[in-house]
Image (tube, rainbow, N blue to C red):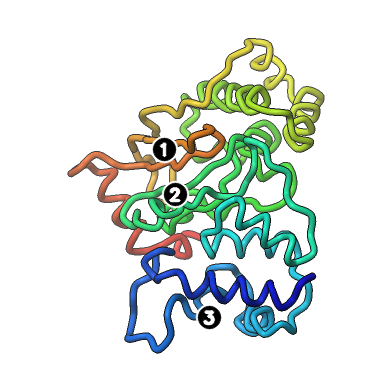
């Protein structure tokens, strides 16, 4: 771990960002350039003291999970992320089209979407980051184990289907399987993708039936009906913006103007997800 270089890199990256670059309001007049330490800490999910000690060359070695969160908060490119890992004394994450490091261009767009649900998803259906309205609609993302993948959850956790009405379950199941096949075909299969396939082939007869159809797709449905436990059905249009290598997508869900769904999304914005917890 190169403490001096790590501290300098973090400080310079923090000072190079404006609040608007990470979706924050400018706030009162600032005495120093860039983001404040407490803002980086809040975005990353660490204490201000922990982050301050990293910049002061006296913090403990950050975990790989913490480094991934820092790379996202500081809007690092893949090359900058790899450099961060090296400075912290960790091996560089393997680069594949299933890499879960969020592309900064997608984050910049997501930061500007405040009035409609939006999230960034990986090729395995992992919610990498989402805005406040998406969390109010879907709940917090799973962050550990194979259950991070929506494909895995769909066939192992019946409650994961509650967000869709029953008449759409078959279509969604086929879409999940087609996305997994596309992810496996797009690159050297990762251990996680192969493990998901092995487990589902062993544990789910429904998955086996659909897998044998050999459907391959990364296309999102143009229209979705979602079910919120308190607000009921919400009809939204679905648009996806892919990275150049198709490994990640920014998914934006918009209700029709003047519709009942728009009123329900507006209510989500006012009340937030804590009301419905």
Classify mark 1: helix, strand or loop: strand
How would you rate the neighbour count of disc 3 (Cα within 10 Å): few for under 14, some for 14-19, many for 20 or more? some
Residue at the outermost left position: 258
Disc number placed over residue 38 in the picture, else none: 3
Between disc 3 and disc 1, whose residue precedes?
Answer: 3
Gap between marks 3 and 1 measured at Cα: 31 Å
- The residue at the point 53 percent across, 53 percent down is 129
On the image, numbered disc 1 is attached to which residue?
A: 241
Expressed as whole percent of the image width and height from the top left, the position of residue 219 reads: 47, 26
- The residue at the point 52 percent across, 48 percent down is 103
- The residue at the point 62 percent across, 35 percent down is 97
Indicate left or right for 269 with 79 as reference. left
On the image, numbered disc 2 is attached to which residue?
A: 105
Q: Are marks 3 and 2 in contact (CB under 8 Å)?
A: no
Indicate left or right for 128 with 145 as reference. left
Gap between marks 3 and 2 measured at Cα: 24 Å
């Amino acid at each position: 771990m190169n403490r001096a270089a790590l501290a300098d890199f973090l400080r310079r990256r923090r000072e190079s960002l404006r609040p608007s670059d990470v979706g924050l309001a400018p706030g009162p007049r600032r005495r120093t350039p860039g983001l404040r330490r407490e803002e980086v800490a809040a975005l990353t999910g660490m204490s201000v003291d922990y982050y301050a000690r990293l910049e002061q060359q006296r913090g403990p070695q950050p975990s790989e999970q913490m480094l991934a969160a820092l790379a996202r908060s500081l809007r690092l490119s893949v090359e900058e992320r790899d450099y961060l890992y090296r400075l912290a004394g960790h091996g560089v994450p393997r680069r594949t089209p299933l890499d879960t490091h969020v592309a900064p261009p997608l984050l910049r767009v997501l930061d500007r979407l405040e009035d409609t649900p939006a999230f960034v998803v990986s090729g395995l259906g992992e919610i990498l980051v989402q805005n406040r309205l998406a969390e109010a609609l879907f709940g917090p993302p799973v962050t550990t184990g194979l259950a991070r993948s929506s494909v895995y959850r769909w066939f192992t956790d019946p409650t994961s289907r509650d967000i869709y009405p029953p008449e759409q379950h078959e279509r969604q199941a086929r879409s999940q399987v087609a996305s997994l096949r596309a992810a496996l075909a797009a690159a050297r299969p990762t251990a996680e993708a192969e493990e998901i396939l092995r487990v589902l082939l062993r544990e789910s007869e429904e998955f086996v039936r659909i897998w044998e159809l050999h459907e391959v797709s990364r296309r999102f449905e143009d229209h979705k009906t979602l079910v919120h436990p308190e607000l009921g059905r919400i009809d939204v249009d679905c648009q996806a913006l892919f990275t150049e290598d198709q490994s990640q997508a920014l998914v934006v869900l918009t209700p029709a103007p003047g519709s009942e769904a728009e009123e329900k999304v507006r209510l989500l914005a006012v009340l937030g997800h804590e009301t419905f917890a």
